[in-house]
Image (cartoon, rainbow, N blue to C red):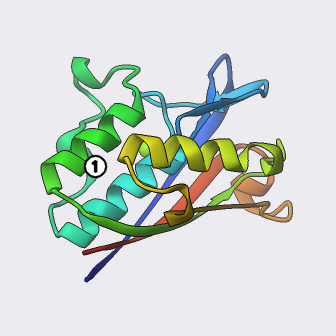
Amino acid sequence: MRIGFGNDIHRLSEGRRLMIGGIEIPYDKGEEAHSDGDVLLHAIIDAILGASAKGDIGMYFPDNKDFTKDMDSIAMLKSIQNQTGAKIINIDSVVTLEKPKLRDHINEIRKSIADALEIDIDRISVKAKTAEGLGPVGEGKAIKAEAVVLLE
Ligand code: MG
């Protein structure tokens, strides 16, 4: 068994899609990024890489290359699963953002991640919380995600 941890943060700006776990969440702002900016998937990818001791997301998907421009983070996740040969026991994660509320989207996000990894949805936990108005996340300027993964 091996445990891994990952986190990520992106600025939020108008004219961008808000991508969380491969799902586009209706909102008037989204993640600023070279790729699609999916903060949750980036945290999960780093957790898988961490458990595998195989570096970090930037080594595989640099943010200054043409092939990662607007890249679908679900494709990144699948690629990392394949490259590491990771057999995932479970993933737990937290997304922190001030708005919008994710409650009604959580199961769709969990299913999206489970489908991408071809594992049961009951192995994927996604929790959402606010930053209580504190700091850049609390001021609605950014979105943050943290994830832990257990590999066999
Ligand atoms: Mg990122």
Give whichever of 80, 43 is nearer the camera: 80
Image quadrant containing the N terminus: bottom left
Location of residue 42 with respect to 94 vertically, above or below? above
Instruction: Describe the element under mark 1 as helix, strand or loop.
Output: helix
Taking 148 as reference, is 69 left or right? left
Q: Is mark 1 within 8 Å of ligand 1?
A: yes
Q: What amino acid is labelled 1 in the image?
A: Ile
Which quarter of the frame holds ligand 1?
top left
Location of residue 118 with respect to 66 vertically, above or below? below
User: Residue 120 location, x and y as percent?
Assistant: 48, 56
Mark 1 crowd level (few <14, some 14–19, many ≥20, 10 Å Cα)? many
Give whichever of 61, 148 is nearer the camera: 148
Write down the quadrant of residue 27 in the picture: top right
Q: Residue at x 49, y 35 (%)?
A: 37
Q: Residue at x 53, y 40 (%)?
A: 112
Location of residue 6 with respect to 143 vertically, above or below? below
Q: Which residue is mark 1?
A: 57
Q: Residue at x 15, y 62 (%)?
A: 54
Write down the quadrant of residue 140 in the picture: top right
| Count of all numbered marks drawn on residues in the image | 1
User: Residue 69 location, x and y as percent?
Assistant: 34, 20
Image quadrant containing the C terminus: bottom left
Which residue occupies the extreme bottom position in the image? 1
User: Residue 115 location, x and y as percent?
Assistant: 45, 42
Location of residue 45 with respect to 109 vertically, above or below? below
Q: Residue at x 27, y 68 (%)?
A: 50
User: Residue 109 location, x and y as percent?
Assistant: 62, 44
